[in-house]
Amino acid sequence: MELHAGDRLTAKKKHPCGSFGWTVLKTGAEIRLKCEGCGRVVLLSPDEVKRMCKKTNGGEKDL
Ligand SMILES: [Zn+2]
């Protein structure tokens, strides 16, 4: 899965605030994601993002 700043992701698990949506703020060795529900920013490795999320911009696709 290729990630770019501005991509939107859907998490497999709901965030405590109730939102499934995340926006990619920054990519690289660590991925910075912002929760669309509460605005919380987290740093994850690309592997963690792949396990946690699927990309949703451009339609529902299994990647
Ligand atoms: Zn949240």
Image (cartoon, grey):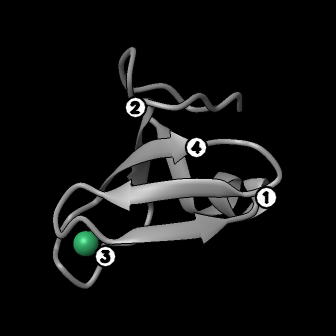
**Is there a contact, CB below 8 Å, between mark 3 and mark 2?**
no
Q: What residue type is labelled 4?
A: Lys
Q: Is mark 2 on a helix, strand or loop?
A: loop
**Rounded to the nearest whole Å, what is the CA distance between mark 3 and mark 2?**
17 Å
Residue 33: x and y in percent read 47, 56
In which quadrant of the rendered view does residue 40 lie? bottom left
**Rounded to the nearest whole Å, what is the CA distance between mark 3 and mark 1?**
18 Å
**Residue in front for this viewpoint, 46 or 12:** 46
In which quadrant of the rendered view does residue 3 lie? top right
* Ligand 1 within 8 Å, label 3 CB: yes
* Ligand 1 within 8 Å, label 1 CB: no
Q: Name the residue under label 2.
A: 56
Compared with 28, 63 (above or below) is above
Ligand 1: give its quadrant. bottom left
Residue 55: x and y in percent read 49, 35
Residue 7: x and y in percent read 45, 30
Q: Is mark 4 on a helix, strand or loop?
A: strand
Residue 21: x and y in percent read 29, 52
Classify 10 Å Cα crowding around label 1: few (below 14), some (14-19), many (20 and above): few
Classify 10 Å Cα crowding around label 4: few (below 14), some (14-19), many (20 and above): some
Q: Name the residue under label 3.
A: 15
Farthest residue to the top: give it.
58
Q: Name the residue under label 1.
A: 47
Of the numbered discs in the image, which one, if any, rests on residue 1?
none
Residue at 36% x, 19% y: name it.
Answer: 59
Q: Mark 4 points at which residue?
A: 26
Classify 10 Å Cα crowding around label 3: few (below 14), some (14-19), many (20 and above): some
Q: Horizontally, is 29 left or right of 8 in the view?
A: right
The tally of labels here is 4
Q: Horizontally, is 53 left or right of 57 in the view?
A: right
Q: Is mark 3 on a helix, strand or loop?
A: loop
Q: What residue type is labelled 2?
A: Thr
